[in-house]
Image: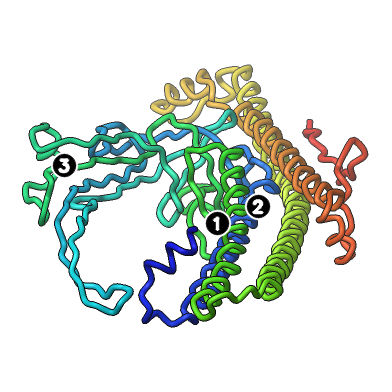
Amino acid sequence: MILQRILASSSPDIPPELFLVLGFGAGAIMLCIAINKKRMQRLMADLPTSRTDGVFIGFNELKGKTRCDRALTSFLAEAACVHYRYSVEEHWSRIVTESYTDSKGKRRTRTRRESGWKTVADDEQMVRFRLEDESGEIRILPQGAKIDPSRIFSRTCGRRHPLYYRKGPRRAVSDSDHRRRFTEYGITLDTPIYVLGQARERSDMVAAEIAADRDAPHFLISTRSEEELRQRKRSGYWGLSIFGLVFTVGGLMLHDHWRYANPGRIPEYLLAGGSYLLIWLISWIWMATNSLISLKNRAEQAKSLIDVQLLRRHDLIPQLVECVNAISKHEKGLQSRLAELRYQPKLDWATPFPDSEPLLTGLLEAYPELHASEAYLGLHQELIDTENRIALARNYYNEIASFYNTRQEIFPDRLLGRMLGERQFKLLGAEREERDPVNLATED
């Protein structure tokens, strides 16, 4: 029935090959988009969520709430936010008279009504902000990201409503019905967000920030949860794959029904469907293989991060200990010398210059400002931060390695892993290899 309606409404001047081009082209495009959605869904599933105090330079996944000292005020909702995008659309309608050729080849005229919405105003604004979780904060630069905000304002009204002209232009579009639709999407303050992006060193301080990167696989900022995003990608993958099959076979069927009265070429339809499924399978294998290789590389990178942090501890801590020992030794000698001078008879340290005696007396009676305790506290804090960095690096590696090992055990990735000769990563546990211990003993 649907096919008959399509054929009845089609012009006889349409070449039948056009159905093949449109059907196969639409099927190929849908398959490419489906594979890309599946790739993103696997990336989200295989990437562990990092804490803001454990973000390492590279690709990261973060969850937290938005914070900003200089928030924007959205145009329609007038809410404090870090990003907003609004549009004002005006409805129009008109009667159109057109000529056409009927089934008998005669020229006829008919009228029909056209209508739609035309955008009369729109804008998008964003500002850098911070993502906060239970461990700290990290700066986010949203420029260049794919932003998936929530709808914060939606209203349709006529020109008698104050909103019509207060937030919209004064001039109307052609054939206007004088109805406008106001819609705004945004990311408000204190909103839970999900961020997928590349971390880099900040230029103004020793800290990381998330920003656009040409080599990063993706940069996403969304108000939806990770599970919701993964479910949408999964549904889009299967939906587009099925529709691609329908368009591929349907294009061939329309071509045959347009050219032949009763083709009945079922084997060719099966061949077209089978070819599409074969390409779909090859595309999936290609995508899954690249996903496994990328996951393996991230696990190797995570493993190298542990060595980076251990090397940092090996080089930094002894230097800090030596510096603290030098400060402590200097202040200890200074205190001993002052104590000796205070207990000497006044005649022993009297100077031949009488005017300098009050100054020297004040110097001996005053207590110099000591910094050894502050140095020890700084060393203590640096030790805590260093060990936390190492623990975070090890935990990050274990999570990445666990994802990779799981992929190696489930079907059908298990078959790909065997074909590629991949091996599982060993997780770091209580028997982890230790580097040389740091000697914190201070000199007397």
- The total of numbered circles placed on residues is 3
- Of the image marks 1 and 3, the number of the one nearer the N terminus: 3
- Of the image marks 3 and 2, the number of the one nearer the N terminus: 2
- Residue tagged 3: 179
Q: Can residue 101 be seen at all in this image of the molecule?
A: yes
Residue shown at the point (58%, 41%) measured from the top left = 62
Front residue of 334/294: it is 294
Rendered view: 407 above or below 368: below
Quadrant of the image for the C terminus? top right
**Amino acid marked by disc 1:** His
Rendered view: 252 above or below 357: below
Question: Mark 3, residues whose alpha carbon is within 10 Å: few (<14), some, or many (≥20)?
Answer: some
Figure coloring: rainbow
> In terms of secondary structure, where does tag 2 sit?
helix
Residue 398, image quadrant: top right
Q: Is residue 158 left or right of residue 236?
A: left
Q: Dots 1 and 2: beta carbons under 8 Å?
A: yes
Q: Point out which mark residue 218 bears.
A: 1
Residue 99, image quadrant: bottom left
